[in-house]
Amino acid sequence: MTGAVAALRAKQQPEIVQVNGDSIANSNLSDKELFIGLRPEHLQIAENPKDKQLTMKVTLTESLGADLLVYGTLSDSNQQMTLRVEGHVVVEDGASLPLTIDTKNIHLFDRETEKRIES
């Protein structure tokens, strides 16, 4: 998933990006407009809906045997995203899934150049 930083309630300060309250330090930010990248395996279905950081509206699921790919959009935008879960998890098309993010695995990109910003 790649998404606008604003979609994750992020704000940028000099050398720090905050995503849902977690700070990501990076000395290469310098007033750049950013977007984030997340791998499907770094999103999880929230065990407790109160812990959710995002909500995904499911549009399609694809069983790969050991894994299930869940395709959808952020509930408050048309930003497409993909979630990978274990194959035994049941997810219905049209469902709204509360998700959490492993913020240690967020990748930052320069919106203008689309190049990854090294930490």
Image (spheres, grey):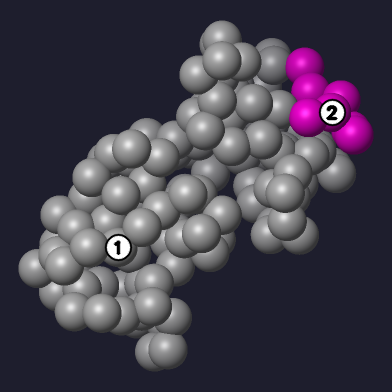
Q: Which mark is residue 78?
A: none
Q: Is residue 10 above or below residue 101?
A: below
Distance from disc 1 to disc 2, alpha carbons, whole Å, reads 32 Å
Where is residue 7 shown, x and y percent of the image?
A: 56, 54
Where is residue 13 shown, x and y percent of the image?
A: 22, 63
Badge 1 marks a residue whose secondary structure is strand
Counting the numbered discs, the total is 2
Question: Which of the 4 image quarters holds residue 37?
Answer: bottom left
Badge 2 marks a residue whose secondary structure is loop
Question: Which quadrant is home to the C terminus?
Answer: bottom left
- Going 47% across and 60% down the picture, which residue do you hit? 5
The three-letter code of the residue at mark 1 reads Gln
Q: Is residue 31 left or right of residue 81?
A: left
- Going 80% across and 38% down the picture, which residue do you hit? 58
- Going 79% across and 39% down the picture, which residue do you hit? 57
- Is 73 included in the stretch rendered in magenta? no
Question: Which of the 4 image quarters holds residue 20?
Answer: top left
Residue matched to label 2: 95
Q: Is residue 63 left or right of residue 13?
A: right
Q: Is residue 79 left or right of residue 9?
A: right
Q: Is residue 23 above or below residue 28?
A: above
Residue matched to label 1: 12
The three-letter code of the residue at mark 2 reads Ala
Comes first in the chain, label 1 or label 2: 1
Question: Which quadrant is home to the N terminus?
Answer: bottom right
Question: 38 or 31: nearer the eye?
Answer: 31
Q: Is residue 86 visible?
A: yes
Question: Which of the 4 image quarters holds residue 54?
Answer: top right
Where is residue 73 shown, x and y percent of the image?
A: 74, 50
Magenta residues, as a range?
A: 90-96
